[in-house]
């Protein structure tokens, strides 16, 4: 296949929102316990944080991490996770049929975030709780001192406020599975009043209202419309969640799911802007795509599926520990392209989750930690997407798919950093059989050097299902992209079939 791409330095979308490269740590399965936190592990530091996992997190480069859920948060009392660990209660977590010891809580997460160099994005419980507990938590976290809640924080060892800026007003409350599920009207009013009360404690915070749990929800569209009709002025963002998987061996449709993500985002933008127009609001509400990933929710019957583990009560059962292959990694790359292409309105995005639970990083209790195939597109895009997002003109051969009809065989996104003069191209070849010959014309930009060029594709003697495992941790990764050259100021490159690549020029 072939593709022609034109880049013009004046055709830009927005500055790169660095919070697009976010991740998510939920009290679920082994994300916290034996994931980021495992006292007694040979690599654990004095606080019980796994330094081997921390090193991989730093290499992957998430900028912001959402915590502590997820479905978990809708039944969680934040007070259970603060104070002396010995005094913390042991609770039932109904969302994941798990025993929560509360050995890890807010202070531990803030400490861990500082070590990881990430911003905290804190979700509050609007399932079983409401306005009062939310404003108490903001006071506990962000008020300097001299009040009951802020002094309790200081007594618990944090002299200075945590300064948490970004807050989620609950999680997936449109979903019947959610503890404290609500109608759009109930939630819209609750979000509005909770937001108001939280801001009265700290006016500098940014707030995310709950959007639809996925595009297929029967209330998708009307949920966002109703919630924002109530809370437009009080919130800054509305959330989106989406998980994708390959169905019935239809890899072509799966590889094109970024088309669905593009359409989903465009739909939410339309709804936000309809409420803006009708309500005569002047500010924009933007999008926090705070859960996205590949997740094999059907078709797997492994022991880590929720219906398998819900027989007994355990503290950190294996839950949805999906192993990601080459195909999944290419799809993850295209999701990041989609998010970047919408960076004018999607200002925050969180890949779900960070460790073990549908995660780019895996770890074993007492054992090693390693990178999944899907680690690589995230790590490179987080490192290299700098400056402004460029609007690409792509003319590509079409691939036929059952779900979307004809789609571009080549999917791409790019950024240009005026300060360093660096241009980063992120590009995927969705074809399972054919290589892609790509030419990139640069207008108003001069590139004289290829700084780096790497590709993730099917490894030697492997296939599209090849993946990294505990015993073969580096089977899938990035290798140098050989077929790439600057010819008369234009870039020419050839991608192997089923590939994701990154080229950096200056
Ligand atoms: O990330 C796993 C789960 O998916 C989250 O807890 C929930 O918000 C979503 O349904």
Image (cartoon, helix red, strand yellow):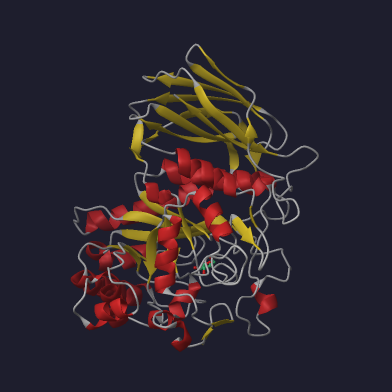
**Residue 186 location (% of width, % of height):** 34, 77
Query: Taking the image as drawn, is residue 259 in sight?
Result: no
- Quadrant position of the C terminus in the picture: top left
**Residue 147 location (% of width, % of height):** 20, 80
The front one of 210 and 378 is 378
359 versus 331 height, above or below = below
Q: Residue at x 44, y 88 (%)?
A: 87
477 versus 270 height, above or below = above
Occupied quadrant, residue 308: bottom right
The front one of 340 and 202 is 202
Q: Residue at x 25, y 72 (%)?
A: 198
Occupied quadrant, residue 306: bottom right
Q: Residue at x 30, y 53 (%)?
A: 273
Q: Residue furthest right?
A: 461
The front one of 447 and 343 is 447
Occupied quadrant, residue 356: bottom right
Query: Taking the image as drawn, is residue 262 in sight?
Result: yes
Q: Residue at x 19, y 53 (%)?
A: 282
Q: Is 368 displayed left or right of 384 in the figure?
A: right
- Quadrant position of the N terminus in the picture: top right
**Residue 77 location (% of width, % of height):** 41, 82
240 versus 398 height, above or below = below
Q: How many marks?
A: 0
**Residue 12 location (% of width, % of height):** 35, 33
Q: Is 145 displayed left or right of 428 in the figure?
A: left
């Amino acid at each position: 296949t072939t593709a022609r791409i034109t880049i013009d330095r004046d055709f830009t979308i927005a500055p790169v929102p660095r919070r697009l490269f976010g991740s998510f740590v939920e009290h679920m399965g082994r994300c916290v316990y034996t994931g980021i936190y495992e006292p007694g592990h040979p690599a654990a530091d004095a606080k019980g944080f796994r330094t081997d996992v921390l090193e991989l997190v730093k290499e992957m480069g998430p900028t912001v991490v959402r915590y502590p859920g997820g479905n978990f948060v809708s039944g969680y009392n934040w007070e259970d996770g603060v104070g002396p660990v010995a005094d913390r209660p042991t609770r039932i977590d109904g969302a994941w049929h798990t025993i929560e010891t509360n050995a890890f809580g807010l202070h531990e997460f803030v400490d861990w975030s500082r070590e990881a160099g990430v911003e905290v994005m804190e979700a509050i419980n609007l399932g079983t709780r409401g306005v009062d507990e939310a404003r108490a938590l903001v006071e506990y976290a962000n008020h300097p001192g001299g009040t009951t809640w802020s002094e309790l924080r200081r007594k618990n060892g944090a002299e200075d406020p945590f300064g948490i800026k970004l807050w989620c007003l609950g999680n997936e409350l449109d979903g019947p599975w959610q503890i404290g599920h609500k109608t759009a009207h109930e939630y819209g009013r609750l979000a509005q009043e909770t937001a108001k009360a939280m801001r009265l404690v700290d006016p500098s915070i940014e707030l995310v209202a709950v959007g639809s749990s996925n595009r297929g929800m029967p209330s998708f569209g009307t949920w966002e419309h109703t919630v924002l009709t109530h809370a437009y002025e009080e919130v800054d963002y509305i959330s989106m969640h989406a998980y994708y998987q390959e169905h019935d061996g239809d890899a072509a449709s799966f590889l094109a799911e970024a088309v669905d993500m593009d359409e989903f985002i465009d739909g939410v933008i339309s709804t936000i802007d309809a409420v803006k127009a009708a309500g005569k609001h002047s500010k924009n509400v933007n999008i926090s795509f705070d859960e996205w990933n590949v997740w094999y929710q059907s078709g797997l019957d492994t022991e880590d599926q929720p219906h398998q583990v819900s027989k007994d009560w355990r503290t950190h059962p294996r839950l949805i520990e999906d192993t990601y292959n080459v195909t999944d990694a290419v799809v993850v790359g295209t999701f990041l392209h989609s998010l970047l292409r919408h960076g004018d309105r999607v200002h925050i995005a969180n890949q779900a989750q960070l460790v073990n639970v549908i995660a780019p990083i895996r770890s074993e209790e007492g054992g090693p930690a390693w990178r999944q195939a899907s680690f690589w597109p995230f790590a490179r895009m987080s490192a290299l997407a700098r400056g402004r997002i460029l609007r690409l003109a792509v003319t590509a051969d079409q691939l036929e798919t059952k779900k979307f009809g004809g789609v571009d065989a080549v999917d791409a996104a790019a950024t240009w950093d005026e300060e360093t003069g660096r241009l980063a191209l992120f590009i995927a070849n969705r074809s399972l059989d054919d290589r892609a010959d790509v030419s990139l014309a640069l207008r108003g930009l001069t590139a004289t050097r290829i700084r780096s060029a790497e590709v993730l594709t099917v490894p030697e003697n492997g296939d599209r299902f090849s993946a990294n495992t505990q015993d073969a941790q580096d089977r899938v990764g990035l290798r140098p992209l050989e077929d790439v050259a600057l010819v008369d100021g234009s870039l020419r490159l050839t991608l192997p079939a089923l590939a994701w690549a990154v080229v950096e020029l200056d």
